[in-house]
Image (cartoon, rainbow, N blue to C red):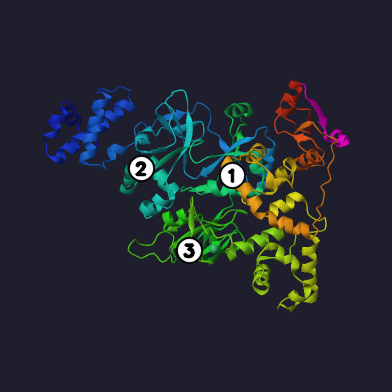
Amino acid sequence: MYNQTMSNLQTYLKLSLSDIKKQPKDKQIEILEELVHYHNRRYFIDNDPIISDEEFDQLTEELRKLKPDSPVLYEIVGEIGEVQHPEPMLSIDKRYSYSDIKKWVESIDTDDFIVEPKYDGMAARYQNGILATRGNGIYGENISGRLPYLKIIGKLPKNPNISVRGEIIIPNSYFQKHLANEYKNPRNAVVGIIKAKQIKPAGIKALQDGGVHFVIYDEAKSLKVKKKDILDEEKWEQILESVLSVDYPLDGVVIKVADKKLREKMGATEHHERWQIAYKLPAEKKITTVVDIKDQVGRTGRITGVAVIEPVELSGATVTNVTLHNYDFVEKSGIDIGCKVEVCRAGEVIPFITKVFKKPKNEPRIYTPPTHCPICNTKVVKNGKYLECPNKNCPARKSQEFEYFFKSLGVEELGLKTIEKFINEFHIQKVTDFYDLKPEQIAQLEGFGEKSAQKIVQNIQNTLNSTITEPQLLQALGIKEIGPATSKILVKKIGFDRLPNATEEEIIENVEGMGPKKARYLLDEIKDKWEIIEDLKKRGLKFKKEETTNKLAGLKFAITGKKGKYSRAELIKLIEQNGGEYKSAVTKDLDYLITGPDAGSKLQKAKELGVKVIDENEFLKMI
Ligand SMILES: [Zn+2]
């Protein structure tokens, strides 16, 4: 339809915009399409434009007004041109298990990493106005013609010498709503929209709607994380969950070294860059129906929605419940009883909902977030994205607090069900009431024999007899901010018995990431719960002493290379138990660098700085 005779084109080229506007509408469209197509080619292919950019913009604007879905507005010009990438766009090396991720992260001498979604769209590169597909990695296709119609997530560099990579991708929600009937999946839709010469009308609409994104890597939805967080499995799962909760089709996450200079230094093999890896999730997704939504109250009072679903098998487990992120998610996603949802479970990660197929608008919503605590009926308060029961004596909070307390002290017999039973039967009000229980009482209850009753009482009493440490008991109090690491620091730096009288300044100074507000909260909670400790002391509480020495007092150590007998974590523990200090970086004021085989840049640096280098055996002789 654009192959008009030359004579037609010659006539049109002589017309001014006001001349064109005098024509009937159909004729105007015909002329404008012809002209835009012609000027496009002159500009992109012949590199010989005969009108100014402003004139060209006026023509396209006019055409857009008359016929917004004209394919000419979305044609790829110059697509016959290949673009050579300034440096090869290599593929990303893949890992399939958490232990392999840990190995990789441990092997790199930096603390700062970036974790971002591994998008399942079409990789592309932008530089100086040119957008090109990855192609075979060396040459890509020029798709610059699509660029003005893509929604850019992140920032395109203005500097013509800087090139950025990203992914052309369609959000799951947009795909479901507008494209699911036209294309098999979001990836197919991207290919169909970006590479086809004739785009389907739904595809053109997607471009107009801003439904096709170019997400620039490193910038959009990436999480800056510390090495120690990746090495902590619980934290790693939180990172995964957060990174994976984006509205794009994904097949894993990418972990990158954050420092761009270090990236350059690490370089690449023939196939992939050494500074990044992909963690491919053996993710399984299934669609099922929400049967019910329940509101659960946690130990700290936070209320979470839990969707009860028709059971599905996912990566080897039967899933019947899925926790909903928070009530903002509930509102925004429109999830309701009777909804179809897509549930995903990847590896060991807890299952989560990746997609909600909303009910038609005219159907009334069955589920509404709670206004009152489902257990104690106290009015809920909103705290950020979360709802909370503010009642500190809420039975749901209490029973979980008690469970957490005894679990932290190693009393395995007191699970949640048993605790709830005891609370009801023995009118337990506070955690120390458990210490008054007698075997005869428990043995009367259904499901308990004399032996098991005795064992429970014995194990509870045992916690008073040098079986638990000070940090362990502090952590057992279940104060929000105080996990195992923080409780150790508090006991070590401030001293257990001084804690209720500590000052805000002491807390801020000693605990990383503490501001005045958090410190105030922490102190209030400690004071609030200290009566538990006082009560236990009256009952004759004796602490287990951690064996420590001062052999390494005043000495600073760093560790590098593959380990021998001891893991890194064990070595750090040994350093600290003997009064030494562990440092992650090699600096001048370091006393020793403990090395193993394959020591990398840290060893180099230590030598340059004149830091003493020892191996594991030499270290063990010191303690
Ligand atoms: Zn409550």
Mark 1 residue type: Lys
Mark 3 residue type: His
* In the depicted structure, whether residue 267 falls above or below residue 381: above
x and y percentages locating residue 249 in the rendered image? 48, 48
The residue to which callout 3 is attached is 372
The residue to which callout 2 is attached is 210
Residue at image point 78% right, 68% down: 457
- Can the viewer see residue 476 in this picture? yes
In-front residue for pair 230/214: 230
x and y percentages locating residue 329 in the rendered image? 46, 54
Going from N to C along the chain, the mark reached first, 2 or 3, is: 2
The circle drawn on residue 518 is 1
Query: Quarter holding the C terminus?
Result: top right
Q: In which of the image's four quarters is ligand 1 placed?
A: bottom right
Left or right: 205 as drawn, with respect to 317: left
Spot the residue most to the right: 621
What element does badge 2 sit on?
A: loop
What element does badge 1 sit on?
A: helix
Q: How far apart are marks 2 and 1 (CA)?
A: 42 Å
Highlighted magenta segment, given as a residue range: 610-623
Residue at image point 58% right, 53% down: 346
